[in-house]
Amino acid sequence: MIQEYVISKKDKQSYLILYGPTWDGASQVSKHHLAKYWAKLGHSVLYVESQFHLISFITRMKEAFRLSARFIFGPNKITNNLWIHCFPSIFPYRSGVSFLTNSFSLAINQFIPRILIKKLCKTLELDNPVVIVGTATALPVIQKLHPKLVVYHCSDDYSSQPNFPASFKALEEKLIARSDLIICTAKALTEVKAPMNPQTYTVTNGADVDHFRSSLDDNTEIPAEIKDLSGPVIGYVGTVFEWLDFEMIAKAARAKPEYNFVFIGPVTTDISIILNVPNIHMLGSKSYSSIPNYLKGFDVATIPFIIHDVTLRASPVKFYEYLASGTPIVATRLPDLERFENLVQLVSRPDQYVESIDIALKDKSTTAVSKRLAEAEKHSWESRFEKIDQLIDLALEKLESGK
């Protein structure tokens, strides 16, 4: 655990995290934990969430109202050193309408953030912050600031995602060229980005190990909605999006009607192929604090991704969280997971999915659980962020020396 303490003014650093995932969403990923890590160490951190727009009030109404309130009344102070804020955009950048994704519409979308983020940094006394960028759409904002360092924290290959506009690729290339440091969350992702900037490194994702290990505590209760299910529970935690192999899931559920396939998380894509399968249970979003309770009720935890450019370059946070809970795991064979082949059932073809689940259901011995927990200890967020700190320090030294 990181002990919170006050550091000297000389050592205190300012960090601006631009366009991270919604702060109070069900999923907590690297940027959430990174902000908390730096704040606990005594640094000043402003976390700016991804923008919302008018269509957000239709597609994610509750969240959009929460974000708009934060824009009007924020920033929200989370701790002595950590503030959260959000800004609107006029046009939905990922609308699929080409004229809404050009440089002119991007400039309009970033007009308000460009002005207000600079003023906000001054108000909060975040002088010359280290800027951590989550997406290339933040580029116009960076150009208005005077950052000490620009770090592109690249967690997915968005330029390969079909729901991102074609213009994003060129925009990301500009961001990579402008960045002093690029940190990718998977080696395969680094291999794609490194030719554009030699200061590109890999720091894979991790987990809040203590939080997820609590699923093994005797006083952790399994929620009734899965405790009362008859038969093994095959679970998934995370956003239900287009990366999931719904055809494989539907076939497995029909082949094993005595198994319960449970999904915890928001649905953001068409799931009609699995909606009418009786032993598939869509439970929706749950609070981050309650996820260990659900994991305790899982007999097997899964990552049933399809194989394409984005998933092949991904480092799923949920894998490390599953590992920390001690739960047997079945996952699509992703390059980032192959080094854990002795601890997880990796699926190379859809027809192997059911067989792998059956094997994982028998992998519950004390020895097997202990091995998963021991491996999880090596992948704490703290260990990841210490490496990020080292890379940032090195990049700052290079800038100061002019190398």
Image (cartoon, grey):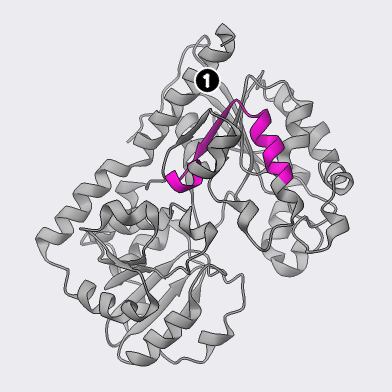
Residue most extreme to the front: 195
Q: Is residue 225 visible?
A: no
Q: Which residue is painted at 47% across and 42% down in the image?
A: 33
> Residue beneath label 1, please?
395
Q: Secondary structure at mark 1?
A: helix
Q: Which residue is painted at 36% across and 29% down in the image?
A: 3
The magenta segment is 170-190
Q: Which residue is painted at 45% across and 34% down in the image?
A: 37
Q: Is residue 363 above or below residue 102?
A: below
Q: Position of residue 204 (x, y in %)?
A: 41, 43
Between residues 33 and 188, which one lies in front from this camera angle?
A: 188
* Image mark count: 1
Between residues 82 and 174, which one lies in front from this camera angle?
A: 174
- Specify the amino acid type for callout 1: Ala
Quarter of the image with the N terminus in it: top left
Q: Position of residue 317 (x, y in %)?
A: 42, 53
Question: Quadrant of residue 197 in the image?
Answer: top right
Q: Which residue is painted at 15% across and 55% down in the image?
A: 370
For this view, does 316 lie left or right of residue 140?
left
